[in-house]
Amino acid sequence: MKALVLFSGGVDSTTCLGMAIEKYGREQVTALSVFYGQKHKKEMEAAKQIAVYYQVEHLQLDLERIFQYSNCALLSHSDQDIPKEDYASQIADAEGKPVSTYVPFRNGLFLASAASIGLSKGCDVIYYGAHRDDAAGAAYPDCSKEFYQAMNQAVLEGSEGQIRLEAPFIEWTKAEVVRKGLEINVPFKMTWSCYLGGEKPCGICGTCRDRAAAFAENGILDI
């Protein structure tokens, strides 16, 4: 069995990578990182370093041009600022729509690309780190259980069952993801989450707040 892991260099995808390596062995695991024009380019640097740490094959894909028409706050060409509020406040302000840091159908594109690459590389499964907290309140609809199930069915149909998706955290909170990562000694110090991509994490964007809260729920400071 061979696995392809969608790998951003953040907490969730790095835990996914650690789990895949534990299950299949590093020689049977390939990490795929996608650049899509994000402001937080530092996560790509983190991904490279973590792939070296785990000694896995690391592929990189550039999908920036696909998102050139979007004004999503995460994108480098956007004139929107990254929100500084927590996700609960952002979801309330969004009035049932995705939050401003939702990149249009990003995970759908990532997973479709991963399916093509995974088939070409002889992989049997694609891991991605969507979790329940990201899907809450339709903040990121492409992280929902329903989206995962629909995409998995499409990948299975489109590949004649040769490759499938696995989202091990789809029913988990971020705190549970961190707990699992601590159990398998994921190098969280090497990961990057902040949307602003500065020298140090800002500590106030939604993803920084969520990360700190997830570590706090596990009784430790963010490492």
Image (cartoon, rainbow, N blue to C red):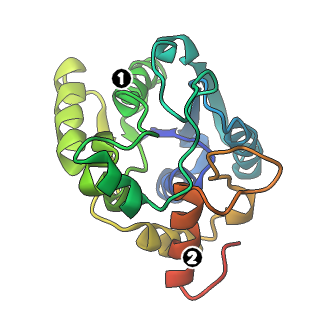
Judging from the image, what secondary structure is the residue with disc 2 in? Answer: helix
Amino acid tagged 2: Phe
Q: Vertical placement of 199 versus 156: above or below?
A: below
Quote the CA–CA distance across marks 1 and 2. Answer: 32 Å
119 and 45: which is toward the camera: 45
Judging from the image, what secondary structure is the residue with disc 1 in? Answer: helix
The residue that label 2 is drawn on is 215
Taking the spot 49% from the left edge, 38% from the top edge, the residue there is: 6
Question: In screen coordinates, is 17 left or right of 165?
Answer: right
Q: Residue 72 bears which disc, if any? A: none
Pointer 1 with pointer 2, Cβ within 8 A: no
**Where does residue 120 sit, x and y in percent of width and height?**
45, 17
Q: Residues within 10 Å of mark 2 (few under 14, many from 20)?
A: many
**Where does residue 57 sit, x and y in percent of width and height?**
65, 34
Taking the spot 31% from the left edge, 46% from the top edge, the residue there is: 94
Amino acid tagged 1: Ala
